[in-house]
Structure formats: structure tokens, C-alpha cells
Amino acid sequence: MDLSTATPADAFKVSIEAGDIIIEFGKVVEPGAMPGGAAVTVSDRMILPIDTGRRLLYWLDDALKAHAAAIRAEEAKALPPGQAANATRPGQPGARAAPEEAGEKAALLLRLVGDIGAPYQYERSFRLCERALLANRFLLTLNARDVPGSLRERALDICGRMGMPRLLRDAADASFGIAGCVHFGFEGDQDSIICKLYLERAVPPKEARDARRSGEPVLLHLAFKWDVLQDAAVTTKYLWYPALSAGEIESRLAHVYRDGQQPSFEIAKAALEMAVAKAPAEKLQYLEVQEDANSRRSFDLNLYNAKLQVKDIQPLLQRMREHFGVRAGQFQALYDQINNKALGHLAGGVHRDGKDFFNVYYGVVGFPHFNDRVG
């Protein structure tokens, strides 16, 4: 598509092919120009990953809100006078139901991070737990060196606009000096909307080497998490065990699952075996997760260096689905969209509610800075 010239279009078509959204734009052929039914000459074709299409939908909806009154007035022109008067009144419900609050909050976070104007990474994930598949989850990552101005101010402002409690904000502010980069996390459904701020340290090489020799972990992430709907908050530590061998990672997993979650332990071991067949275990970053306020005990294993795709662990995903009693059709609908994505992290263990779970992260993509000037 040539962005230097405008190509008017009065027709479009949307389809999904191989996990991408295809949008075609064109002009309706003048009546009589061609025999038969209506015809469109296609001028441009846009291909978007489904995740990008979702963000485009959110931002288009947000951009149109400012013009809602004018749009209602234009639509009312085609209605009888009595109906037109009602249709143009402010606050009248539209043809669609209002978006769910979780979707609105997700869109707000995406917009706020995008408005910084710095490159960022976008990574999606889903959680499998007892009779539940939670797919509205993502991480957005910013490096301090890429952010114009103060990363501390920009990040804490975003957290404030996402409803971060004051005490938690003060704690994040006090710890912000460790941050070489930050991650904004989101997960939401109709019952819970959890927002997260992760501060990631740039661990000095000597500290990593010393940790490897001693067998003790080092703090990599300090995360601040709050539930917008339930007025709850927690601080989470992510502890890195540098350069563990496959046997050492398996021993750590056994410690995480020491209270008898055998099916999940076997699944985690199988995922580790698949990964070390593709990359040395020492290249797979292994973290353990702690929260002082509860008995959470979990792990995070970074699998990107193994260069696997989600479909490569399909048998393990089916075992997870069966173990947690998730409906086959519900899971298949998600799997069909993401099976060709790069497999990122596998997280699991015992969550703060005392029940086991798995989180699967996938398909990290980078979004560059977009300069508004053309020329």
C-alpha cells in the first residue's frame, strides 16, 4: 500500500487465512459497468496477525468515540423522523452491547504504552487451571534506554491510570532504581482484572557467576500486581538460577511440585526434555517465583532458545487440558489460532490459591517507534 497517496475506498472485505487477518479495500463498480451482481475492484490488501487486528479494533473503537454524536446523526438521516429523534439523543444504546470491562482495560493499557512512542515487545499467553482456560493475557516490554524522558514517571503514570493502589505505587517507586526494563502485564475476565508492573534487573555477570557457583538464586524481576475489581494487591519476586543443567532444573521442578502434583510435574519434565533436545539446558533461563503473603510456589522456564513452536508441544497441551478438565472445543478454538507461534515461556506450579496451573507464553513480537512525520 502506497502511503504517499490516498486511495479512496467504499468497500472492504475481511477474512482469516492461516492465522492472519486479510483486509481488502476497493471501489464498487458503477452500476451497469459490469453484468450480474455487484462487483468491487480491489485496490489494496492488508495482512495483519490476529493479535495486531485485535489492537486495531480496540484503537478504532476508541478513536470513533469522540465522533459518536456525529455518527449517530448521520445514521439517523435514513430513519423516520420519530425514530431519528430518539437515535440522536446522547447516551442512547447502540446496536452493539458495550464492550466488557476487561476488554476496555486491555485496550487502555495497549494505547497508553503505544502513546509513549518507544519500541516495545508484545507477548501473549494463556493459563490452564481447574476447569478454566484464560486467554486474555499479555505482556508489554519497554527498555529504559528507548523511552524518551523518565521511564519511572511514564511507567508509574500508566500504572496510576490503570488503577494501581497508592501504597503499591509507592513501593514500586521506591524500588524503581533496579529497573533496566519494565514489563506491563494484563490478565482479565468477567470476574477479575489483574494489572502488573515488573521491574527487571540487568544482573551483572559477576553476580550471575557467583550465584551459579553457590547454587543460590539472584533477584531478576520484582513485580507489583493488583486486581482492579477485587481491591487486592501482591508483590512477587522472580528468582533466577543461572546456567542450570537439565538435571538441576528437574530437581528444582521436583521441589516446586513436592506436595504431590504428579501429573503436572510429569508434564513439566516432558516439556524440559523436548527443549533440551533442541538447545543446551544452560541456555534456558529458569526462574522460581515467591510471594511473601501466601504459599505460592511456581517456576518459569524460558524456552525461546529451543526454537519450538506451540504445535510442537501439542500432546503436552492436551494432557494439560485433560488434567484441568477444560472443554476440548474451547481449547481447540484457541490452539487453531496460535499453533504456528513461537513457544516462549512455560510457567507452572502451585498458585496463591493452593492449586496447580500452567501458563504458556508465545509469539513475542516487537513494535518499532512510529514517527508521525511523513517525508
Image: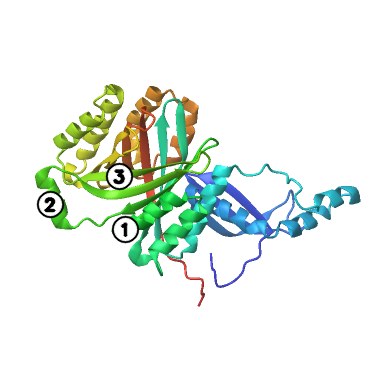
Task: Report the number of numbered marks.
Answer: 3
- The Cα–Cα distance between marks 1 and 2, rounded to whole angstroms, is 20 Å
Q: Label 3: which residue? A: 237
- The Cα–Cα distance between marks 3 and 1, rounded to whole angstroms, is 14 Å
**Residue 67 sits above or below residue 17 on the image:** below
Residue at 36% x, 66% y is 146
Residue 55: % across, % down: 52, 52
Residue 207: % across, % down: 15, 54
Q: Which residue is at the front of the view, 255 or 320?
A: 255
Mark number for residue 210?
none
Residue at 49% x, 27% y is 329
Residue at 21% x, 30% y is 255
Q: Label 1: which residue? A: 179
Query: Is residue 308 at least partly visible in the picture?
Result: yes
Tell me the mark number nearer the camera, choosing from 1 and 2.
1
Residue at 62% x, 53% y is 61
Which badge, 3 or 1, comes first in the chain's sequence? 1
Q: What's under tag 3, amino acid-wise?
A: Lys
Q: Which residue is at the front of the view, 52 or 197?
A: 197
Q: What's under tag 1, amino acid-wise?
A: Ala
Mark number for residue 209?
2
Dot 3: few (<14), some (14–19), or many (≥20) neighbours within 10 Å? many
- The Cα–Cα distance between marks 2 and 3, rounded to whole angstroms, is 20 Å
Is label 3 in a helix, a strand or a loop? strand
Tell me the mark number nearer the camera, choosing from 2 and 3.
3
Query: Is residue 141 at least partly visible in the picture?
Result: no
Q: What's under tag 2, amino acid-wise?
A: Arg
Tell me which corner region of the image, top left, top right, bottom left or bottom right, holds residue 174. Answer: bottom left
Q: Which residue is at the front of the view, 347 or 164?
A: 164
Residue 311: % across, % down: 36, 37
Is label 2 in a helix, a strand or a loop? helix
Residue 269: % across, % down: 24, 30
